[in-house]
Amino acid sequence: MPESHPAQPMNKWQRLLLPHSRLERLTLFLLLAGLSIASIQLLLFAQTGVPQTLLAAGGVALAVVMTAIAYVLARRQRRDAAGMWLIAAVFLAYASGELAFSGTTGFFVIGGLLVIALVSLTAFPRRWRVWLIASGLYLLLILLINLLEPLPRHNARDLATLMIQIPAATVLVAIFVLWQVVRAVRGISTIRTRLLVAFVGVALVPALIVIAGLFVGGHTSGKHRVQAQLESVATLKEAEVQTWLDDLQSDLILSLTGDEVSRRLIVLLQERDPSLYPIGYSVLQTRFRQVIQEPGRFEDLFLMDLEGQVVVSTDKTMEGQNHSQELHFQQGLKEPNVQPPFYDVTIGETVIVASRPVYNTQGEVIGVLAGRANLDTLDAIMGERAGLGETGETYLVDSDYTLLTANRFGEKNIKVDTEGAREAIGYQRSGVGMYDNYRDVPVVGSYHWLPTLQAALLAEQTQAEAFRGVYTMLGIVTGVGLLAVLLAVGVSLVVAQGIAEPLTDLAETATEIARGDLTRTAPVQGEDEIATLARAFNSMTAQLRGMIGQLEERVAERTQELERRSRYLEATTEVMRTAATVLELDPLMQQ
């Protein structure tokens, strides 16, 4: 008897090669991926306060718990139960994301189907019904969420981090699935499965590459295009603001133009003749009011003497006030000047004051004319939204990071501590970027530093609108890619069936013939190479049957010959035995 050897214990490397060990590794991968995604969602919630990110994080966290249960089951080699828990975890993770966000359905569909396929391939090998049923239920769930929308959904395009995370995660899942499929195909013995995997891979890999390339290229080109558009708008607005500032000085000059006005200025600021004061005051008041009403760029105009005392003002409450310590007076004695925005406590508003020196006929400075600018004109300049789309806007922020002009929601005097404002005001420079605006909405922005006003001009547009065209094209391409994959699956099933079925029949026939059933013939279908092989096989089988028949005939003939000779020998033997008996009787007779 052959000597029996006891079974050798498996080492750790042999254990890793067992099917349930591959399932454990997959479960660990999904566990780590889920923890990473949940952490990113919690970080987004901390940064943006969007409640939908918390919902998505909660769904992924529950999916992580379910994945941990699947890992325990996989360790106990309960493959089917572990696979079901993993599929349920995939449903929960992706469905929570679809419940929370809009604009990412294409990525969730592709990513979910890929992970379901990966789990099915690992936990339920060669059980395609499980994958098909799970995929169908998953697509139905995504469809119902989009049709019913049971919860308010946040547009994912408003969150730049999310729009990078979701496509990146989908690409990583696709790469991992492809790697697992390549490994699995090496161990597949059936031609039908190999053909199916090959067809799907041929359709899926280019689709994923095209989607990834379109997303990266489209996102980059879209960003540059929008930034260039916003930069041109900001440059145009800056020029309009500078024109407005120049017009302020022009209105001040207009207020001092005319011989009558010049004479009255000398009377009020230099000669100070009390008898002529009322006439001079009336003339200047009339001229100042005309300038305020006609161009409309000033709220108030006021004239100060060399001591800073207000002599004439369209706002009578200002007359007699001393502005000798104010910047608009001190700078106005030297040259035309615009004082940067500041908060005037007397009227409770942010104001801009333009001023310039007043000269006599000898060119000597005898006072300062100043005016409080009408910021409605500035609001109108910033409020013009041509070239900015639906969500675009331009506004000014002063050096205290306070909104100087109204935003598109009509708000003023609110804090604007954004990246664009900090870059322009803190570093006194111009540029473009992507950041969150004063409402924590991701925007593409252009910022300019305006040294005259000591303020920042910002032109912004939400990223959702800026990249809408890119995301729309990406959604269309994703849908076409998914359709191509489904079409490839259908075509591959038909083609694989057409190739594999005749080969399977041929293999079964060969097996039966090898077992001794020479009456079997391979079915011949069509005129292709497989049909030729089947005909050749049938011909070979027929020749084999003929050879075996001839051999059987020869064996039968030889058998008959041997039987005849055997009978002859038997008869001869019997005769000899009889003769021997006769010879033995003769001596007895003689005795």
Image (spheres, helix red, strand yellow):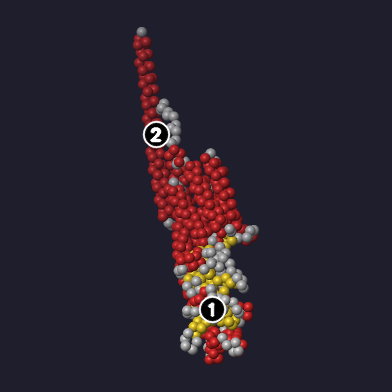
Q: Secondary structure at mark 1?
A: loop
Residue under label 2, please give it: 559
Question: Residues at badges 1 and 2 in contact (C-beta under 8 Å)?
Answer: no
Q: Amino acid type of disc 1?
A: Glu
Residue under label 1, please give it: 307
Q: Residue furthest bottom?
A: 259
Asked whether 342 or 145 is in front, the reply is 342
Whether residue 71 is visible to the viewer of this picture, yes or no, is yes
Asked whether 247 or 491 is in front, the reply is 247
Q: Amino acid type of disc 2?
A: Thr
Q: Which mark is residue 325?
A: none
Whole-percent x, y for residue 318 in the image: 61, 78
- Identify which residue is drawn at 53% across, 67% down: 400
User: Of the residues tagged 1 and 2, which is closer to the observer?
Assistant: 1
- Identify which residue is drawn at 54% across, 90% down: 263
Q: Relative to residue 587, is residue 289 drawn left or right?
A: right
The correct choice, above or below, for 573 with respect to 136 in the image is above
- Identify which residue is drawn at 51% across, 46% down: 27
Whole-percent x, y for residue 110 in the image: 52, 57
Q: Earlier in the sequence, mark 1 or mark 2?
A: 1
- Identify which residue is drawn at 41% across, 52% down: 533
Q: Residue furthest top?
A: 591
The residues bearing labels 1 and 2 have C-alpha atoms spaced at a distance of 149 Å
Q: Residues within 10 Å of mark 2 (few under 14, many from 20)?
A: few
Whole-percent x, y for residue 49 in the image: 58, 58
The correct choice, above or below, for 61 with respect to 475 in the image is above
Asked whether 72 or 136 is in front, the reply is 72
Q: Secondary structure at mark 2?
A: helix
- Quadrant of the drawing holding the C terminus: top left
Q: Residues within 10 Å of mark 1 (few under 14, many from 20)?
A: some
